[in-house]
Image (cartoon, rainbow, N blue to C red):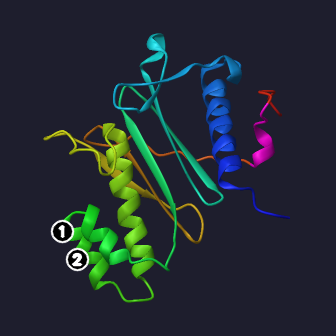
């Protein structure tokens, strides 16, 4: 069976997000209105601002973070060893993270980079800023936690709070939430 293309995975991840939000809000997924804030971060319509969410997908994996009252960010990265990871780290990561990537054994360097990149991107997504689009707000309190998802992936979640809520993870197959919005028991 052929792996779906990037566009198909993008659509599937967004339908999964609507399905998860629909289950959480007890609404039909197709009725949920997702808007973008002024910085381009997805959010629910005005009346539902207490529920915060974020979505990330890479390769065959998608992650959704939900939070109440506190902004959240999530990132998943498929580990790709055949890139100049040190150059990418030097361009975007903090000096301590660059040093950790540089100091990792060659066999561990790709995972070390992707773990740090996932933490960095989850934090920026939590704050609503892009990777290369400006600095995060000074003094922002964000707690980041690694998530163990599957071999070959690195993932992290971030919450704008001094201490994260307990992390709960659910796994479901792609048939659990269908494009037409019908729930499957």
**Above/below status of 17 relative to 86:** above
Please tell me which residue is depicted at 44% across the width and 43% down the height of the picture: 166
Q: Position of residue 94 (x, y in %)?
A: 21, 63
Q: Is residue 168 left or right of residue 170?
A: left
**Are there few (<14), some (14-19), or many (20+) residues within 10 Å of tag 2?**
some
Residue 137 lies in what quarter of the image?
top left
Quarter of the figure with the C terminus: top right
| Residue 95 tag number | 1
| Range drawn in magenta | 173-179
Which of the two residues, 98 or 92, is positioned nearer the viewer here?
92
**Are there few (<14), some (14-19), or many (20+) residues within 10 Å of tag 1?**
few
Q: Is residue 178 magenta?
A: yes
| Residue furthest right as drawn | 1
**Residue named by callout 2:** 99
Marker count (numbered): 2
Please tell me which residue is depicted at 75% across the width and 37% down the height of the picture: 177
**Above/below status of 117 relative to 99:** above
| Residue 146 tag number | none
Give the spatial CA distance, label 2 vs label 1.
6 Å
**Circle 2: element type:** helix
Q: Is residue 49 visible?
A: yes
Please tell me which residue is depicted at 28% across the width and 82% down the height of the picture: 102
Q: Is residue 171 visible?
A: no
Quarter of the figure with the N terminus: bottom right
**Circle 1: element type:** helix
Mark 2 and mark 1 in contact? Answer it, CB < 8 Å: yes
Q: Position of residue 104 (x, y in %)?
A: 33, 84
Residue 100 lies in what quarter of the image?
bottom left
**Above/below status of 174 relative to 78:** above
């Amino acid at each position: 069976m052929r792996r779906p293309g990037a566009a198909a995975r993008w659509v599937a991840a967004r339908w999964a997000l609507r399905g998860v939000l629909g289950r959480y809000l007890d609404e039909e997924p197709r009725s949920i209105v997702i808007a973008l804030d002024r910085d381009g971060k997805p959010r629910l319509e005005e009346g539902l601002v207490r529920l915060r969410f974020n979505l990330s997908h890479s390769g065959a994996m998608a992650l959704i973070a939900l939070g109440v009252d506190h902004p959240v960010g999530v990132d998943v990265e498929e580990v790709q060893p055949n890139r100049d990871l040190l150059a990418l780290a030097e361009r975007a990561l903090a000096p301590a993270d660059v040093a950790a990537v540089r100091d990792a054994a060659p066999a561990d360097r790709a995972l070390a980079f992707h773990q740090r990149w996932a933490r960095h991107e989850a934090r920026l997504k939590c704050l609503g800023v892009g990777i290369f689009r400006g600095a995060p707000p000074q003094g922002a309190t964000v707690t980041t936690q690694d998530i163990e998802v599957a071999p070959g992936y690195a993932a992290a979640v971030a919450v704008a709070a001094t201490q994260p809520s307990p992390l709960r993870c659910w796994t479901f197959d792609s048939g659990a939430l269908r494009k037409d919005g019908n729930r499957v028991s």
